[in-house]
Image: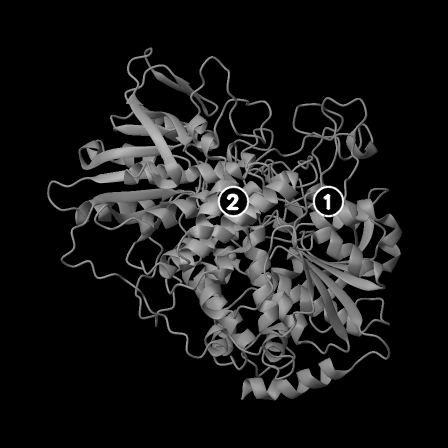
């Protein structure tokens, strides 16, 4: 009854249309949970008044580009809006002299952007990588895959429209309004490259910053004991992972402070919806209860189930004190202001407004210093972008969460990077700012904010509604697990496969699954998110196993950081000292996370990543939490027959194997052999490594470089190791021959899939320089071949001999393997007959 009472009002308000053309809108989003609430809200509005033209993805914040772009496509498909352009990434860069090349992808903040897409996580390290962070965002807590339908649009390498292409196309077409609900990197780059198009931008609405805000999270309750420590309570910002170094910044502005400064100071009219306002509209139990009873459209149900799963999996179950309606509230405030376009005071239904003079802090006083923290100035005769020497950008720039400059003993941090500071003077810009959410006009309503009522009404409108979800798109689809009947069969050697989910790893997995079970009994798979793919790509592993009828094989999620890289204060975040070597764009994470565009061609497995407490409780599969790697390892050991052992094949960084080695001193008695794909045996400095993104390191191999401490722990153990190093893998650089062989094989689904994947890798390598390293992944199949003992595959032959007592020790420096004493086996040569 509550919903129906509000519905008529919403229809009347939304139906009032400005005479003439609709307001064209472009949204730049990092696709965090509340971002797609904001998108769905906009998609529900009357198109004759509000016409969403494009969505561009901010790829250096709360989501990873490959997972985000496909979720956007699925949401738009559900809503019948495949006409909306979607932009992500780009391979352009910024030269040392500050010249901005076309098509910069926005994977890195401006201060870190070079000529490629690999780089340091100066600001992004504040965002949790796993639970409560990008893993949950990329998968939408595991609910995305089970709910959203799937259309024809998907990411395809070199065919995907880029961010800058979409922005230029839509903004040059005529007057448009821009919504920024992530970091400002993409839009700042657009303004730097296209100042002549600023005239087409009517207004910019921004969710972000904190001007006079006081963080309500982390406060000690009344009558608390003296041991209760106030955490970010009362801070201007909301960096819950980094308030000890920076209590002033809000996440969207902290993601790229210099970009935010460029936008705020661009001269384009700006309206800011900061923490000042969003802190006054926290999610509460009454709202969620009413929402539960108001799920009359697919989009309403998707939003409700997301909030429910967020509540059940939130850190310390504190959702109601730390989750606010950030971006959806911004959409409502912005469209209400636009609706009253002739009122320049910002009159709207949902927030109180005020004009405030402010700026964005990009560096810390004293200005004009050179301490190695500021690439815009340090070591330069002329500052980058012709910035003013001794100006506001020339101070110390925060280098990370535990930057010593920012830390204050027994106090809160002093760094202010990303702070939207109120001030007067030449550095100030007058901005229209939302200061507080308006209360409900209905005194009898259980919803205490006017926006809450409007949000539920709009999502449940019968107009512009979603057409179907996954199960109604495919009414005969059933979640069935396919498991082989292995009873009475003689099983081969027990194998555990440790993979970092690169393209080559998936080919190796297909090979292992095709080997008869009386040769290889694949007991389990461990995935390592410290390599070439992000953690959410574990769902692609589940889907491939489902295609092969092997839903019986468990999959464990490994540590999210290389050894000694997780933060000592807040373990969910950490450094990217080694992971920074992986490109974020083409040929890197973007392609690995989508399996070069083929992940969506796999059948959907009922198994998927689920947040720890957030899995649907009514599922017939009661595994409510994604198994962790060490938990799965212990389960594998318990399942072994008396006297039997397990063989391990690692195709990525040795993080998981090192954890196994360090967790159990007696584990060597249960491990038969270890086969390691990786390392570079450096004889007299004659051969180079393959870490092409780190020019200063000529000899390292990626799997060793991505976690050198783990490699040191493994090679220092008593394991019986067969090493298949880079020099051997490089011999398998024969794309045409392998493709010709696959064309002659039996046309099974897996053979066709492998051929298509290999064909695409080969085509990309020939077409674009960002894919020059594709043959690296082809060599990763060798480990599975050696493990299976089938040296005749592809006419491949090995001479495997032990190397003994060359010198005294194994030393790893920056991922470079110096061979000084080996008791492992190593293939000395390989060839193709």
Element carrying mark 2: loop
Judge by depth and name the residue closer to the eye, 557 or 400: 557
Residue that label 2 marks: 241
Q: Is residue 744 visible?
A: yes
Element carrying mark 1: helix
Colour scheme shown: one colour
When asked about the image quadrant of residue 630, the answer is top left
Residue 823 lies, in percent from the top left, at 28, 20
Is 785 on the left or on the right of 276, as rendered?
A: left
Q: Do the residues labelled 1 and 2 touch (CB within 8 Å)?
A: no
Is 58 on the left or on the right of 568, as rendered?
A: right
Residue 801 lies, in percent from the top left, at 29, 22
Q: In this view, does 349 lie above or below 830?
A: below
The crowding category of the residue bearing disc 2, from other C-alpha atoms within 10 Å (few below 14, some 14 to 19, many at least 20), is many
Residue that label 1 marks: 259
Q: At x 80% / y 22%, what residue is drawn?
A: 381
State the CA–CA distance, disc 1 to disc 2. Answer: 22 Å
Residue 743 lies, in percent from the top left, at 47, 51
Q: In this view, does 477 lie above or below 433?
A: below
Q: At x 42% / y 54%, what residue is drawn?
A: 751
Judge by depth and name the residue closer to the eye, 828 or 809: 828
When asked about the image quadrant of residue 297, the answer is bottom right
């Amino acid at each position: 009854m509550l919903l129906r009472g509000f519905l008529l009002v919403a229809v009347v308000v939304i139906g009032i249309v400005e005479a003439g053309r609709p307001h064209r809108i472009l949204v730049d989003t990092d696709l965090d949970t509340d971002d797609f609430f904001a998108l769905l809200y906009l998609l529900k509005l009357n198109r004759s008044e509000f016409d969403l033209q494009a969505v561009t993805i901010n790829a250096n914040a709360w989501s990873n580009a490959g997972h985000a772009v496909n979720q956007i496509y699925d949401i738009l498909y559900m809503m019948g809006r495949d006409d909306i352009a979607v932009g992500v990434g780009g391979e352009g860069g910024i030269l040392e002299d500050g010249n901005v090349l076309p098509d910069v992808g926005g994977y890195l903040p401006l201060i870190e952007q070079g000529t490629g897409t690999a780089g340091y996580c100066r600001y992004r390290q504040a965002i949790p990588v796993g639970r409560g962070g990008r893993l949950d965002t990329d998968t939408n807590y595991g609910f995305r895959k089970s709910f959203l339908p799937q259309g024809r649009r998907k990411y395809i390498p070199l065919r995907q429209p880029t961010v800058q292409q979409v922005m230029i196309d839509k903004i040059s077409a005529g007057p448009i309004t821009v919504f920024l609900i992530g970091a400002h990197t993409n839009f700042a780059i657009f303004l730097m490259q296209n100042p002549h198009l600023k005239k087409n931008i009517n207004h910019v609405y921004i969710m972000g910053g904190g001007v006079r805000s006081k963080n309500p999270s982390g406060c000690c309750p009344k009558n608390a004991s003296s041991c209760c420590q106030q955490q970010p309570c009362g801070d201007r910002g909301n960096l819950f992972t980094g308030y000890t170094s920076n209590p002033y910044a809000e996440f969207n502005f902290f993601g790229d402070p210099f970009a935010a400064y460029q936008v705020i100071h661009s001269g384009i009219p700006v309206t800011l919806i900061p923490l000042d306002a969003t802190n006054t509209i926290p999610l509460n139990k009454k709202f969620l209860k009413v929402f539960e009873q108001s799920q009359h459209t697919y989009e309403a149900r998707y939003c409700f189930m997301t909030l429910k799963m967020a509540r059940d999996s939130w850190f310390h179950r504190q959702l109601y004190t730390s989750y606010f309606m950030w971006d959806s509230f911004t959409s409502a405030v912005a469209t209400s202001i636009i609706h009253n376009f002739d009122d320049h005071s910002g009159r709207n239904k949902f927030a109180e407004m005020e004009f405030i003079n402010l700026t964005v802090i990009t560096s810390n006083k004293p200005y004009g210093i050179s301490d190695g923290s500021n690439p815009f100035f340090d070591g330069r005769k002329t500052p980058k972008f012709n910035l003013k020497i001794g100006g506001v950008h020339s101070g110390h720039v925060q280098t990370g969460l535990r930057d010593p400059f920012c830390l204050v003993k027994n106090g809160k941090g002093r760094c202010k990077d990303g702070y939207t500071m109120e001030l007067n003077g030449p550095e100030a810009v007058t901005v229209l700012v939302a200061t507080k959410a308006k209360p409900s006009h209905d005194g009898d309503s259980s919803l205490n904010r006017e926006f809450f009522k409007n949000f539920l009404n709009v999502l449940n409108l019968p107009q512009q509604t979603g057409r179907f979800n996954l199960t109604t798109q495919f009414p005969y689809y059933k979640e069935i697990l396919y498991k082989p009947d292995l009873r009475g069969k003689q099983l081969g050697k027990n194998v555990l496969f440790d993979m970092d989910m690169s393209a080559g790893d998936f080919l190796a997995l297909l090979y292992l699954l095709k080997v008869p079970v009386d040769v290889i009994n694949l007991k389990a798979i461990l995935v390592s998110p410290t390599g070439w793919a992000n953690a959410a790509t574990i769902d692609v592993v589940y889907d491939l196993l489902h295609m092969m009828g092997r839903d019986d094989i468990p999959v464990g999620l490994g540590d999210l950081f290389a050894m000694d890289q997780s933060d000592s204060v807040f373990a969910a975040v950490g450094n990217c000292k080694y992971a920074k070597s992986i490109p974020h764009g083409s040929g890197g994470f973007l392609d690995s996370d989508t399996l070069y565009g083929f992940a969506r061609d796999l059948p959907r497995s009922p198994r998927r990543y689920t947040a720890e407490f957030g899995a649907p409780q009514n599922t017939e599969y009661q595994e409510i939490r994604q198994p962790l790697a060490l938990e799965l390892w212990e389960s594998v050991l318990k399942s072994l027959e008396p006297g039997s052992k397990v063989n391990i094949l690692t195709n990525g960084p040795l993080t998981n194997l090192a954890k196994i080695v360090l967790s159990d001193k007696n584990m060597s008695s249960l491990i038969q052999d270890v086969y390691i794909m990786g390392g570079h045996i450096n004889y007299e400095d004659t051969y180079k490594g393959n870490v092409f993104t780190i020019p200063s390191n000529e000899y390292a191999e990626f799997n060793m470089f991505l976690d050198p401490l783990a490699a040191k722990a493994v090679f220092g153990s008593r394991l019986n190791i067969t090493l298949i190093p880079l020099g051997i893998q490089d011999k398998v650089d024969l794309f045409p021959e392998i493709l010709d062989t696959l064309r002659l094989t039996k046309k099974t689904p897996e053979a066709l899939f492998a051929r298509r994947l290999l064909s695409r890798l080969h085509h990309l390598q020939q077409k674009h320089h960002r894919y020059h390293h594709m043959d690296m992944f082809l060599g990763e199949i060798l480990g599975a071949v050696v493990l299976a003992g089938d040296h005749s595959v592809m006419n491949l032959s090995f001479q495997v001999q032990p190397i003994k007592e060359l010198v005294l020790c194994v030393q790893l420096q920056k991922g470079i393997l110096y061979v000084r004493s080996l008791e492992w086996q190593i293939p000395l040569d390989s060839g193709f007959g």
